[in-house]
Image: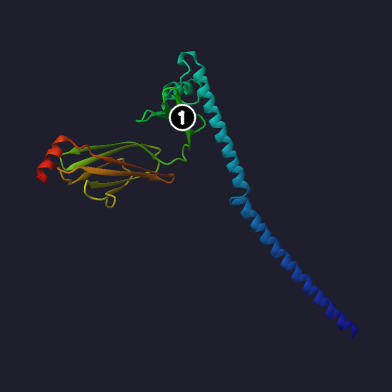
Amino acid sequence: MEQTKEKLRFKQQSGITLIALVVTIVILIILATISVNVIMNGGLINKTSSGKQMHELEREKERLEIVKGDVVSNINHVGKVTVDTYVEELINQGITDESEVTNNEDGSKTVITDTGYSVLIEPVGENDVKITIEGKVGELPPRIKHVELTREEETKLVIKVEAVRTEGAVYKYYYKTTTGDYGEAVYSGPNASYTIEGILPDEVYTVKVEVSNENGSAIEIVSEPLVASKLKRRHICMV
């Protein structure tokens, strides 16, 4: 009888020990999963990567500001920093190259540095420039530099787009008259130019261009110039 009770007690203890072991293993698996997710998804790895990127960005900003000081101290520049003299100094110091300089229509310039950053240099008055680091090349959205609209045969409107950072980009074209609204895109594809056919010769058109890739998008809206011949025709139609 005593032996039977002892055996039952042993089985009960063994069962409790096994259950405790299973529970412990399950808890360890859950904790391990949580730890991996914290480290991989927005945790230690992302924080480390973000910290490194911020450090690199601050170091780039500091380097570019030092170049501005070099321009000011140059006796030939009379204490002035212009977009041209600043870019010239960047080239002299090997921070950028002439082939990596883009002239923008608003008097600013965009350069790609030797560390792979796209930097916008804008004039501030006559004696200073504003330096804006746009980001790493390859991680930036497209930028539209210029959109040209020209008429062909009165009923065709030719759109030509000049843009940068367009790797893998999709171009979309929309248009409307002065009294209408934009409809669906008349074209969506890789072409940086498009011809709208069948337009009205007496109407003025506005075109919206959208260039997008995996990094983002850029939109530009351009209207046809209202030439005298169209003004005359529109006046006649209104009488």
Q: Nearer the viewer, residue 190 or 72?
A: 72
Residue at 90% x, 83% y is 2
Q: Where residue 50 sits in the image (x, y, percent)? A: 58, 42
Amino acid found under the numbered disc labelled 1: Lys
Residue at 59% x, 39% y is 52
**Most distant residue in the right direction:** 2
Q: Nearer the viewer, residue 218 or 212?
A: 218
Query: How dense is the environment of label 1, judged by Cα within 10 Å: few (below 14), some, or many (20 and up)?
Result: some
Query: From the image, which quarter does the C terminus lie in?
Result: top left
* Secondary-structure class at tag 1: strand
Left-right relation of 202 to 169: left
Query: From the image, which quarter does the N terminus lie in?
Result: bottom right
Q: Where residue 22 sits in the image (x, y, percent)? A: 72, 68
Q: Where residue 116 sits in the image (x, y, percent)? A: 49, 33
**Most distant residue in the top direction:** 75
Residue at 52% x, 20% y is 70
Q: Where residue 163 sits in the image (x, y, percent)? A: 35, 37
Left-right relation of 43 to 176: right
- Is residue 36 shown above or below 95? below
Judging by the rendered image, the residue that carries numbered circle 1 is 130
**Figure quadrant of residue 6:** bottom right
Left-right relation of 30 to 125: right
- Is residue 98 shown above or below 173? above
- How many discs mark residues in the rendered view? 1
